Amino acid sequence: MADFLIGVQIVSIIVLFGEAFYVFANWNQKMHGYLFLFCIATIVNNLGYLLEMVSRGPEMSLIGTQISYLGKTMIPFAMAMFTYSFIRGKIETYMAAILGVFHVFIWLLVLTTEYHHLYYTNIEFTTDGLWPHNVYTHGFFYYVFVVMCFAYFIHLAKISSGRFRQVQTAIEKKQMLNLMMVAICALLGLIVYMLGVTQGYDTTSLGFAIGSLFMLNALWRYNLMDASELAKSQILDHLTDGYVVINSKNDIVYYNDTATRIYPEIVINQKQAAETLIADYAKEEPVVRDELFFEMDEQNIYQKDVYRGTMYVLRDITREINDEKDIDKYKRTAEDAVSQKQKFLTDVAQEIRTPMNSILGIAELMMRKSVDEETENYLLDIRKSGNSLIGFVNELVDYARIENGKYEANNSVYSVKALLQDLRGMFFTRLSDTKVALKFDIDPSVPKNLEGDLSRVKQIIVNLMNNAIQHTEKGEITISLRVAEFAYGKVLLRFGVKDTGCGIKPEDQERIFDLFAKVDNEIVDEHGHGLGLSVAKQLVRVMGGEMGMNSMYGEGSDFYFTIWQGVDTSEGIGFFENNDIEDGNEKSRRHWTDSFNFRAPEARVLLVEDNKVNRVVTTALLKPLGMRIDTAENGKEAVQMITSGSYDMILMDIFMPVMDGVEATKLIREIDDGAYAMLPVIALTADSEEKARENLLAAGMDDYIQKPIKIEEIVHVIERWLPDDKMVREN
């Protein structure tokens, strides 16, 4: 008999591994995660009990019990979460958290049972029964856990049977019947074990094993993970009309995604949402949300002449309303106000960037000199604070631009590996003085070359990284990239930034993407403005993607987003080297020297800049290159100097008095019938508009550098456009 039961245990583990693999391979919904947790928990439970069955000593038997409880404590919780998700029921977040903590607490009691009598008051080893085993005298929390398990299994069997009576199709009935049998098997196994007639054999494992067969039957025969129900739900979710169903008790039993955009409180407080919706319907007026107008209709639902509830339909009538002249007038006024705000922010941004170019440049120059450690730290603080201010201005302008509807995709073919390398280099200095490691987890099947808006993809990741760095004092930050789906020459990518920082409290997670949201006032550094996450989510939205997050307070957060990108090269990127950021204190102090990998003593460059301080700073920054740098105060002076000198390159500011950089460039191109048509002209500008680069290139300029100037960027551009015979490479 003992050998037979051991064989049953082994077979159940094999079956469960098959179930877990099947669930993992077909995982496409949140509830599938609960189902996967159920499979893994049952595997751990059965493996632990198998170790108990074959052990021949008290120590090994106790270890088996502790391993078994690691899974046993999670099985009822995972069953409940999956069942509720499957039937579209709702467990409040706080209740799920309490239950999860309770089960972890029980396992910790078992793990530490040798040091207390809370779960087991006594442990004795016996050779009686089917096999040698430990005999446990039960403590208070043992009975608490048993009562909780009884409550779980009875409740799950009850709601499954109730759902069985409600569903209409045969396959849904069979799905619910199998789920009900899983709960019943677990319940019977627990009852038999508690009767004490099994000679030490824990029949709960047998109950789980038999239940796994019903789960297997539901998965493979009755398509428990079939996407048809998901497809139905998604069809309703993507309708422009909102649908809300309220039962006879005024409880919301169904709503689609459109309804959540009209009544966001549905997700947080359904009772309040139901009251608001019913009150809005009674007003007999259109519902207004974010300048959108919705007309509400109701339809009572009857089943065999018995009233079951009411379905409210919210139809978007904004177009009809906007046809009215008064609405059009108000709309134009609002658009003008938004445009003026956008222009104001853009002008302010330009005015801030110009002096910040001087401030950051001077700090950079000072860091090249031999200064004491205290002064050097002050300079580092200046640089960090300046970059923080520029980052804030950029994010504010981006948010206003998106809000104004001026986002335009700038799609082009880009290299995924180059993007990842840029990110690794970008955050090297940021993390070099910290105890945080930067890691990459990249799916080798991600296509090498994609087509999309590279600058925006990078900006989103940078914003998520800034947030992770802000809240992570030690540990690691991981940038991940996964292929979610291929379809019609495109790929759905899932980017993620996961940290081991302080995490986010559950009550703060609902507003984490709000404008200027700061969830913990005690954790603020030079990179935190409360704008980055909001801008990132808005960018993902206008790119047609979705952004979300998972966080455990005290353990860390995982922010992710999905976007579609075109596939230019289907070949996978392959293995991306996962180098941690090394200890770079020294490199962070002398990072500027790495930018100068060449000298150009024979080169002659004309710097055109109306701001005297910027002329001095830019000239000094480029001094290590050894170039001869002449300066002009405006475009008119630059045109005159070109005709009297021989230059290899022009660094041209844009907004200048007398003659601006664009007009000067056009005149230079026309001198002597195009004699200077090939002379490289590099734009220096504080303009952050989307089409700035495009407009400047169309005006005859060759490249573009945004202020404040970053030394590594300007050196890279100079190296790109300066003639090779003018450069001497450094080893």
Image: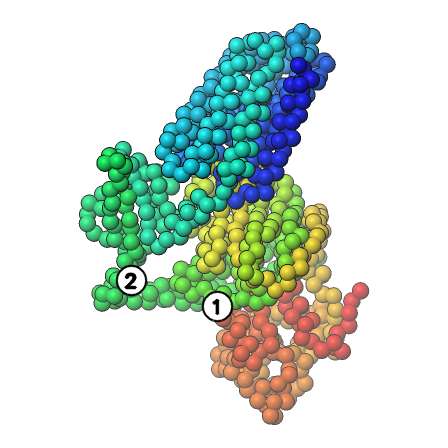
**Foreground residue among 413 and 180:** 180
Q: Secondary structure at mark 2?
A: helix
Residue 699 percent location from the top left of the image: 53, 80
Q: Residue at x 58, y 27 (%)?
A: 42
Residue named by callout 1: 689
Q: Quadrant of the C terminus?
A: bottom right
Q: Specify the quadrant of the image occupied by residue 490.
A: bottom right
Indicate left or right for 509 with 682 as reference.
Answer: left
Q: Position of residue 495 (x, y in %)?
A: 57, 51
- Residue under numbered circle 2: 319
Helix or strand or loop: what does disc 1 sit on? loop
> On the rendered structure, is 322 left or right of 731?
left
Residue that extends furthest to the bottom in the rendered view of this protein: 672
Q: Is residue 304 above or below residue 54?
A: below
- Residue 4, by quadrant, is top right
Q: Give the colour scheme of this rendering.
A: rainbow
- Report the disc number at residue 394: none
Residue at (55% x, 21% y) in the render: 207
Give the residue at the far right of this rendering: 731
**Relative image position of residue 658 (x, y in whole percent):** 49, 82
Q: Residues within 10 Å of mark 1 (few under 14, many from 20)?
A: some
